[in-house]
Each structure stands twice: as structure tokens, then as C-alpha cells.
Amino acid sequence: MTVADILSQTMQLPETDRAEIARQVLLTLPPAVVQEKLQSQWVAEIQARLAAYDRGDMEASDWDEVAARLEETLDRKATS
């Protein structure tokens, strides 16, 4: 079985199962490797969002609005 086969089969699973697989795989990696990869991905994401904001493609949101949307989303997921 190849990595591509495993990935293809994994992508057929429900989101919660995929998240658990990802968590378990990450736990097998040395913390420094995981942290380095996550750090570089967050830097890239922050830079992309800042560029989108600077171009006018993205608006800033007030923290209270963001927190309310997040709470609403979490409440919906908890009741579904």
C-alpha cells in the first residue's frame, strides 16, 4: 500500500475520523518538527491574509463580532 493509497482511503472517512488520524500521526513526530512546520505555515497564512487586507480583498472584524460568530458556530455544531 502506498502513501497515495492511504491518503485516498483516509479522505473517504468522516471529518472526525480524519482529524483523529491526523492527531495520532502528529503525535508520532518529534515536537520540534511539528512546531517548525506549523510555524512556517502560520507565517505564510498571516502574510497572505495581510496582503489580502492591504489589497482590500478582506475586511477586518471586531473581536466581539468574531467571538460571537465562533460561539454561534460551536453552538450549531454541538446541537447537530
Image: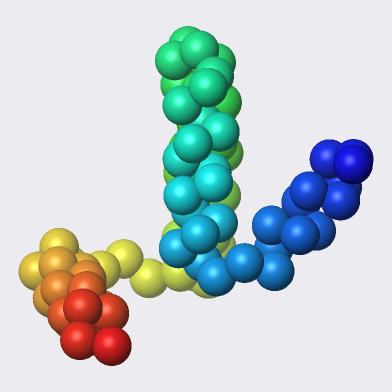
Q: Nearer the viewer, residue 45 or 26?
A: 26
Q: How is the image coloured?
A: rainbow
Residue 46 in the image: x percent, y percent? 46, 44
Q: Quadrant of the C terminus?
A: bottom left
Please provide percent x and percent y for residue 30. 50, 12
- For residue 17, above or below residue 20: below
- Which residue is pictured at 56% across the width and 33% down the height? 25
Is residue 51 visible to us here?
no
70 sits to left or right of 16: left
For image coordinates 31% across by 66% down, the residue present is 60
Query: What residue appears at the point 70 percent right and 69 percent down from the top-left corner?
Result: 12
Residue 25 seen by the camera: yes
Q: Quadrant of residue 40?
A: top right
Asked whether, in this view, residue 56 is left or right of residue 3, the answer is: left
11 lies left or right of 19: right
Q: Position of residue 13 (x, y in %)?
A: 62, 67
Closer to us: 37 or 16: 16
Q: In this orientation, which residue lies closer to the viewer: 26 or 55?
A: 26
Q: Is residue 7 left or right of residue 29?
A: right
On screen, 32 above or below 20? Answer: above
Place of residue 50 in the rendered image (x, y in percent of width and height, measured from the top left)? 47, 50
- Say which residue appears at 44% left-offset and 15% top-offset: 31
Query: Which residue occupies the extreme left position in the image?
Result: 64
